[in-house]
Image: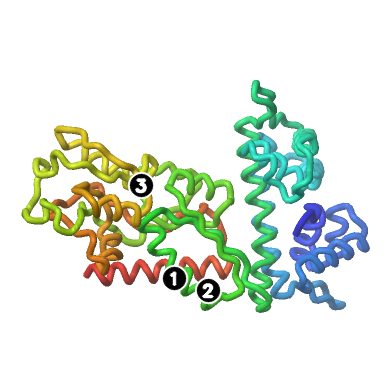
Amino acid sequence: MSNSSLRHLRAFQLVAKLQNVRKAAEAVHLTQPAVTLAIAKIESQMGAVLFERSSRGTYMTSAGKILAARVDRMFDQIDEALASVDIHRGNTASYAAVIDRITRPQVRALCSVASGDLANIDESAISRASIYRSARELEKCLGKALMVRTVNGLTVTEAGATLGRRLSLALQEITSALEEILAEENRGFGELRIGAMPLSGSFVVGPVLNDLTLLYPEATLEVKVGEIQQLTTDLQHGDIDMFVGILSGGDDMAEIEREHLVVLPYVIVARSGHPLTRKSDLTYEDLEGYDWVAPGPHAARRATFDLLIGNLRRKPNTIQVTSLATMRLLLSGCDRLALVTRFELEQERELGTLVELPFGPIEPMHSLGIARRANWMPTPLHQKFIELVRRQAGKIIAAKS
């Protein structure tokens, strides 16, 4: 839904609530033909009939109910977004007028200025001046300063960045409604944008997506691999729908809901034939003098790695990697050590190149899980993905027992 007027969506919301076009028209200060035209436009964009009309009233179809639920969520989120810049419900008419003047191009422009990526707009040929102008229009509409000029040029205030992010997430509800309607009518299955943390997250997401494509062959699937810090930011900004991977208790995940599925114990691994494989019940003293392949600085497992290495008298030389394939190559040609989850080691067991050393337990342990935005409502495609991830976690638990 490209640039549908929020006023039109408010008219739709009231028709759905009041079950009467005339009463809805009076509430939004439009003529009855204007409301009828607005509904027709929304139906055209959604590709579905939203109301059944009779002499007794106007009643929602199943598609109408889907859109109504999403529109309610959208306006609730817009209210929260405006409250974040101290715009609260006061005079109902004036507050509604403020919301009605907000447009998608304004929100996209504000988000682009916030990210510093002025090309991050659908209209690739749009000029930088046009982006700034749209963002300024939103400032004027709200009566709030959202941008400041710095030595590096125009940028958004902290409040402006928060507002842009929340408004962008609110408007995504309409896209989700369209995907749900298409799925219900078997005309498409929407889009799934997944984050996967290296190693464990990727191992789980791979087979899950294979199963998902069998059920939803027309779905558009996108996977972004990254560490927890970047994926959390992407999730908060709505660039991904959820992510899968190692979740630690100390993560800074504001507005994020975490579902811990299975605890994955850590183990130390080395190449087959490593000198330490000939020993039993290793101690920290046995680990002295060996170099390590280390997780990246933002990896969830980094805290566990740092605690482990901190118990050694000599700080070892390390090479940071995020790929198990790269780790395998680094370990295979020398006596380096590495920290992986037992689940990751199981994925490598068939190759026979990495073996577990008799050391442990290693704490803190972390869990494999799913992170998503709090109060987010998944589409059927999202829900099926979550269901399959839970099933995959169940297989990991069964294999451990």
- Residue 398 screen position, x and y as percent: 27, 72
* For residue 154, above or below residue 397: above
- SS at circle 2: helix
Q: Are marks 2 and 1 in contact (CB under 8 Å)?
A: no
Residue 395 picture location, percent across and down: 32, 71
User: Which of marks 1 and 2 precedes in the sequence?
Assistant: 2
Return the x and y of residue 55 as percentages of the image width and height. Answer: 87, 77
Quarter occupied by the N terminus? bottom right
- Identify which residue is drawn at 52% across, 52% down: 373
**Is residue 92 visible from the viewing direction of this image?**
no
- In the picture provided, is 122 more to the left or to the right than 269? right
Residue drawn at x 65%, y 40% is 117
Per the rendering, the mark at residue 388 is 1
Residue 163, image x, y percentages: 65, 40
Q: Tell which of 384 and 22 is nearer to you.
A: 384
Mark 3–mark 2 distance (CA, rounded to whole Å): 30 Å
The amino acid type, in three-letter code, at marker 1 is Leu
The one nearer the camera, 358 or 247, is 358
User: In the image, what residue type sits under mark 3?
Assistant: Val
Instruction: Classify the position of the C terminus by image quarter.
Output: bottom left
Q: Which residue is mark 2?
A: 213
**Which quadrant would residue 317 be assigned to in this image?**
top left
C-alpha distance separating marks 1 and 3? 28 Å
In this rendering, the count of numbered labels is 3
**Front residue of 23 and 268:** 268
**Badge 3: residue crowd in 10 Å (few <14, some 14–19, many ≥20):** some
Q: Nearer the viewer, mark 1 or mark 3?
A: 3
Going from N to C along the chain, the mark reached first, 3 or 2, is 2
Tell me if residue 220 comes above or below residue 125 in the rendering.
below
Where residue 39 sits, quadrant-wise, is bottom right
From the image, tell me which residue sits under label 3. 321
